[in-house]
Amino acid sequence: MLICRFSTDGRQGYGQLDGAQVIPLAGAPFAGPPRPCGRPLPLAEVSLLPPVTPTKIVCVVLNYANGAHPHLRSDVPRPPVLKPPSSVAGPGDCVPHPGEPWQLKHEAELAVVIGVGCKDVTVERAIDVVAGYTCANDITAYAPDADADTGGSGFRGAWAKHFDAFCPLGPWLATDLDHADLEVTCRVDGEVRQHGSTKHLIMSVPEVIAQVSEHMTLVPGDVILTGTPAGSGPLHVGHQVEVSISGIGTLRNGVSEGIPL
Protein backbone atom coordinates (compact mmCIF):
# COMPACT_ATOMS: atom_id res chain seq x y z
CA MET A 1 0.00 0.00 0.00
CA LEU A 2 1.18 3.54 -0.80
CA ILE A 3 0.17 6.24 1.68
CA CYS A 4 0.79 9.94 1.09
CA ARG A 5 0.43 13.06 3.18
CA PHE A 6 -1.17 15.90 1.25
CA SER A 7 -2.81 19.30 1.41
CA THR A 8 -5.80 20.57 -0.51
CA ASP A 9 -8.00 23.63 0.01
CA GLY A 10 -6.01 24.57 3.10
CA ARG A 11 -6.47 21.17 4.74
CA GLN A 12 -3.87 18.50 5.42
CA GLY A 13 -4.33 14.77 5.75
CA TYR A 14 -3.20 11.29 4.82
CA GLY A 15 -4.44 9.36 1.83
CA GLN A 16 -4.07 6.04 0.10
CA LEU A 17 -2.92 6.11 -3.51
CA ASP A 18 -5.25 4.32 -5.90
CA GLY A 19 -3.93 4.84 -9.42
CA ALA A 20 -4.28 8.55 -10.20
CA GLN A 21 -6.48 9.14 -7.16
CA VAL A 22 -5.94 9.75 -3.46
CA ILE A 23 -8.46 8.21 -1.05
CA PRO A 24 -8.49 10.34 2.14
CA LEU A 25 -7.84 8.41 5.36
CA ALA A 26 -8.95 9.06 8.91
CA GLY A 27 -5.97 9.83 11.14
CA ALA A 28 -2.30 8.99 10.72
CA PRO A 29 -1.03 5.66 9.34
CA PHE A 30 0.39 4.81 12.78
CA ALA A 31 -3.01 4.78 14.51
CA GLY A 32 -4.21 1.37 13.34
CA PRO A 33 -5.51 0.10 10.01
CA PRO A 34 -6.23 2.94 7.56
CA ARG A 35 -9.90 3.88 7.26
CA PRO A 36 -11.15 5.69 4.15
CA CYS A 37 -13.07 8.90 4.82
CA GLY A 38 -14.33 11.19 2.09
CA ARG A 39 -14.47 11.16 -1.66
CA PRO A 40 -11.40 10.29 -3.77
CA LEU A 41 -9.31 13.23 -4.96
CA PRO A 42 -7.32 13.49 -8.20
CA LEU A 43 -3.63 13.10 -7.37
CA ALA A 44 -2.83 15.93 -9.78
CA GLU A 45 -4.98 18.32 -7.75
CA VAL A 46 -3.38 17.83 -4.33
CA SER A 47 -0.02 19.05 -3.02
CA LEU A 48 2.18 16.28 -1.68
CA LEU A 49 3.81 16.94 1.70
CA PRO A 50 6.62 15.07 3.45
CA PRO A 51 5.04 11.69 4.25
CA VAL A 52 5.82 12.05 7.97
CA THR A 53 6.75 14.74 10.51
CA PRO A 54 9.47 13.04 12.57
CA THR A 55 10.70 14.07 16.00
CA LYS A 56 14.16 12.99 14.84
CA ILE A 57 16.00 11.71 11.78
CA VAL A 58 18.78 9.21 12.46
CA CYS A 59 21.40 8.97 9.70
CA VAL A 60 23.40 5.74 9.52
CA VAL A 61 26.78 6.34 7.87
CA LEU A 62 29.13 4.17 5.82
CA ASN A 63 26.64 1.31 5.58
CA TYR A 64 27.17 0.11 2.00
CA ALA A 65 29.90 -2.26 0.87
CA ASN A 66 31.99 -0.20 -1.58
CA GLY A 67 29.71 2.71 -0.75
CA ALA A 68 30.16 6.46 -0.62
CA HIS A 69 33.15 8.09 1.13
CA PRO A 70 35.56 5.09 1.02
CA HIS A 71 38.31 7.28 2.53
CA LEU A 72 36.28 7.44 5.75
CA ARG A 73 35.58 3.71 5.99
CA SER A 74 36.61 1.92 9.16
CA ASP A 75 36.22 -1.56 10.63
CA VAL A 76 34.77 0.10 13.74
CA PRO A 77 31.08 1.06 13.35
CA ARG A 78 30.61 4.81 13.40
CA PRO A 79 27.83 6.35 15.48
CA PRO A 80 24.90 7.74 13.48
CA VAL A 81 24.33 11.44 12.91
CA LEU A 82 21.07 13.16 13.86
CA LYS A 83 19.22 15.63 11.66
CA PRO A 84 16.69 18.05 13.16
CA PRO A 85 13.00 18.07 12.15
CA SER A 86 13.64 21.41 10.42
CA SER A 87 15.76 19.58 7.84
CA VAL A 88 12.70 17.79 6.40
CA ALA A 89 11.48 18.80 2.94
CA GLY A 90 8.78 17.30 0.77
CA PRO A 91 8.34 16.28 -2.86
CA GLY A 92 8.99 19.19 -5.19
CA ASP A 93 10.40 21.45 -2.46
CA CYS A 94 13.59 23.36 -3.20
CA VAL A 95 16.71 22.81 -1.12
CA PRO A 96 18.26 26.21 -0.29
CA HIS A 97 22.02 26.27 -0.89
CA PRO A 98 23.66 27.80 2.22
CA GLY A 99 26.33 29.53 0.12
CA GLU A 100 30.09 29.73 0.54
CA PRO A 101 32.14 27.97 1.76
CA TRP A 102 29.71 25.06 1.71
CA GLN A 103 29.58 22.55 -1.12
CA LEU A 104 26.61 20.20 -1.29
CA LYS A 105 26.47 16.49 -2.08
CA HIS A 106 23.50 14.22 -2.74
CA GLU A 107 23.09 10.94 -0.86
CA ALA A 108 20.21 8.74 -2.06
CA GLU A 109 18.93 6.52 0.75
CA LEU A 110 16.16 4.18 1.80
CA ALA A 111 14.33 5.77 4.74
CA VAL A 112 12.67 3.58 7.37
CA VAL A 113 9.64 5.15 9.07
CA ILE A 114 8.83 3.94 12.58
CA GLY A 115 5.20 3.05 13.25
CA VAL A 116 5.34 1.70 16.81
CA GLY A 117 7.23 3.30 19.69
CA CYS A 118 10.10 1.12 20.84
CA LYS A 119 13.27 0.86 22.89
CA ASP A 120 15.80 -1.99 22.80
CA VAL A 121 13.91 -3.83 20.08
CA THR A 122 15.54 -7.08 18.95
CA VAL A 123 16.68 -7.76 15.40
CA GLU A 124 14.02 -10.47 15.17
CA ARG A 125 11.23 -8.04 16.09
CA ALA A 126 12.58 -4.93 14.39
CA ILE A 127 10.37 -5.07 11.30
CA ASP A 128 7.29 -5.22 13.55
CA VAL A 129 7.85 -1.57 14.52
CA VAL A 130 8.10 -0.30 10.91
CA ALA A 131 5.23 1.69 9.39
CA GLY A 132 6.82 1.74 5.95
CA TYR A 133 9.59 3.01 3.74
CA THR A 134 10.18 6.10 1.63
CA CYS A 135 12.87 7.76 -0.49
CA ALA A 136 15.31 10.17 1.13
CA ASN A 137 18.09 12.47 0.01
CA ASP A 138 20.51 12.89 2.91
CA ILE A 139 22.00 16.12 1.60
CA THR A 140 25.34 16.92 3.17
CA ALA A 141 27.49 20.07 3.10
CA TYR A 142 31.28 20.06 2.91
CA ALA A 143 33.68 22.93 3.45
CA PRO A 144 37.04 22.67 1.64
CA ASP A 145 38.67 25.13 4.04
CA ALA A 146 38.02 22.64 6.86
CA ASP A 147 40.30 19.98 5.42
CA ALA A 148 43.03 20.58 7.97
CA ASP A 149 40.57 19.76 10.76
CA THR A 150 38.71 16.92 9.07
CA GLY A 151 41.42 14.68 7.69
CA GLY A 152 40.85 15.95 4.17
CA SER A 153 37.14 15.12 4.06
CA GLY A 154 35.80 18.66 4.50
CA PHE A 155 33.07 17.18 6.68
CA ARG A 156 32.20 19.46 9.61
CA GLY A 157 30.29 17.01 11.73
CA ALA A 158 26.69 17.74 12.67
CA TRP A 159 26.60 21.14 10.92
CA ALA A 160 27.10 19.38 7.61
CA LYS A 161 23.64 17.81 7.81
CA HIS A 162 21.68 20.33 9.89
CA PHE A 163 20.70 22.95 7.32
CA ASP A 164 17.04 23.55 6.51
CA ALA A 165 15.53 21.21 3.89
CA PHE A 166 18.60 18.92 3.90
CA CYS A 167 16.39 15.85 4.27
CA PRO A 168 13.85 15.63 1.43
CA LEU A 169 11.47 12.70 1.99
CA GLY A 170 8.81 11.21 -0.25
CA PRO A 171 6.92 11.03 -2.40
CA TRP A 172 4.90 8.68 -0.18
CA LEU A 173 5.13 5.78 2.24
CA ALA A 174 5.26 2.17 1.01
CA THR A 175 3.87 -0.04 3.76
CA ASP A 176 4.11 -3.56 2.31
CA LEU A 177 7.64 -3.78 0.97
CA ASP A 178 10.46 -6.31 1.15
CA HIS A 179 13.43 -4.19 2.18
CA ALA A 180 16.08 -6.82 1.38
CA ASP A 181 16.80 -6.04 -2.29
CA LEU A 182 15.56 -2.61 -3.35
CA GLU A 183 17.28 -0.66 -6.12
CA VAL A 184 18.35 2.83 -5.04
CA THR A 185 19.11 5.32 -7.84
CA CYS A 186 20.00 9.01 -7.87
CA ARG A 187 19.85 11.18 -10.99
CA VAL A 188 20.98 14.79 -11.30
CA ASP A 189 19.56 16.60 -14.33
CA GLY A 190 18.77 13.17 -15.77
CA GLU A 191 22.28 11.74 -15.33
CA VAL A 192 22.59 8.63 -13.16
CA ARG A 193 24.97 9.43 -10.30
CA GLN A 194 24.22 6.61 -7.86
CA HIS A 195 22.86 3.12 -8.34
CA GLY A 196 22.91 0.37 -5.75
CA SER A 197 20.80 -2.16 -3.90
CA THR A 198 19.87 -2.59 -0.28
CA LYS A 199 21.17 -6.16 -0.54
CA HIS A 200 24.62 -4.56 -0.21
CA LEU A 201 23.89 -2.93 3.14
CA ILE A 202 26.54 -3.84 5.71
CA MET A 203 23.99 -3.69 8.53
CA SER A 204 20.57 -4.87 7.38
CA VAL A 205 17.44 -2.82 8.01
CA PRO A 206 16.47 -4.91 11.09
CA GLU A 207 20.02 -4.63 12.45
CA VAL A 208 20.00 -0.86 11.96
CA ILE A 209 16.68 -0.48 13.79
CA ALA A 210 17.86 -2.67 16.66
CA GLN A 211 21.14 -0.78 17.02
CA VAL A 212 19.51 2.65 16.98
CA SER A 213 16.85 1.58 19.50
CA GLU A 214 19.61 0.47 21.89
CA HIS A 215 20.61 4.10 22.28
CA MET A 216 17.34 6.04 22.00
CA THR A 217 13.60 5.63 22.17
CA LEU A 218 11.97 5.67 18.76
CA VAL A 219 8.43 7.05 18.41
CA PRO A 220 5.90 6.80 15.57
CA GLY A 221 6.96 8.96 12.65
CA ASP A 222 10.68 8.89 13.43
CA VAL A 223 12.92 8.27 10.42
CA ILE A 224 16.09 6.21 10.05
CA LEU A 225 18.23 6.76 6.95
CA THR A 226 20.03 3.52 6.16
CA GLY A 227 23.10 4.73 4.25
CA THR A 228 23.97 5.68 0.68
CA PRO A 229 25.60 3.68 -2.15
CA ALA A 230 28.67 4.80 -4.08
CA GLY A 231 28.52 7.85 -6.31
CA SER A 232 27.60 10.69 -3.95
CA GLY A 233 28.45 13.83 -5.90
CA PRO A 234 28.19 17.62 -6.02
CA LEU A 235 24.99 19.64 -6.19
CA HIS A 236 24.81 23.21 -7.44
CA VAL A 237 22.10 25.84 -7.65
CA GLY A 238 19.72 24.94 -10.46
CA HIS A 239 20.28 21.20 -10.27
CA GLN A 240 17.24 18.92 -10.31
CA VAL A 241 17.72 15.79 -8.21
CA GLU A 242 15.74 12.54 -8.37
CA VAL A 243 15.95 9.71 -5.85
CA SER A 244 14.18 6.55 -7.05
CA ILE A 245 13.66 3.34 -5.08
CA SER A 246 12.01 0.26 -6.54
CA GLY A 247 8.61 -0.40 -5.04
CA ILE A 248 8.28 3.18 -3.78
CA GLY A 249 8.66 5.76 -6.54
CA THR A 250 10.69 8.88 -7.29
CA LEU A 251 11.39 11.88 -5.06
CA ARG A 252 12.20 15.08 -6.99
CA ASN A 253 13.76 18.27 -5.62
CA GLY A 254 15.64 21.27 -6.96
CA VAL A 255 18.51 23.24 -5.46
CA SER A 256 17.76 26.94 -5.05
CA GLU A 257 19.69 30.13 -4.35
CA GLY A 258 19.18 29.99 -0.59
CA ILE A 259 15.49 30.91 -0.72
CA PRO A 260 13.78 29.44 2.35
CA LEU A 261 10.84 27.09 2.03
Image (cartoon, rainbow, N blue to C red):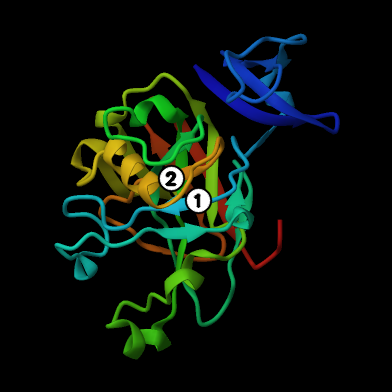
- Between residue 258 and residue 59, name the one nearer to us: 59
- Where does label 1 land, which residue? 57
Q: Position of residue 259 (x, y in %)?
A: 70, 64
The residues tagged by marks 1 and 2 sit, at their Cα atoms, a distance apart of: 6 Å
Tell which circle, 1 or 2, labels the residue nearer the N-terminal end: 1
Q: Position of residue 232 (x, y in %)?
A: 33, 58
User: Could you tell whether 41 is left or right of 63 in the image?
Assistant: right
What secondary structure is found at the residue carrying circle 1?
strand
Relative height, residue 183 to residue 253 (above, below)? above
- Where does label 2 land, which residue? 224
Q: Given contact means CB atoms under 8 Å apart, are the residues at marks 1 and 2 in contact?
A: yes
User: Could you tell whether 26 is left or right of 230 in the image?
Assistant: right
- Between residue 171 and residue 163, name the one nearer to us: 163
Residue type at tag 2: Ile
Q: Position of residue 97 (x, y in %)?
A: 58, 67
Q: Position of residue 189 (x, y in %)?
A: 46, 51
Q: Residues within 10 Å of mark 2 (few under 14, many from 20)?
A: many
Relative height, residue 223 to residue 155 (above, below)? above
Quadrant housing residue 91: top right
Which residue is depicted at the point 39% across and 83% down? 144
User: Could you tell whether 151 is left or right of 1 in the image?
Assistant: left
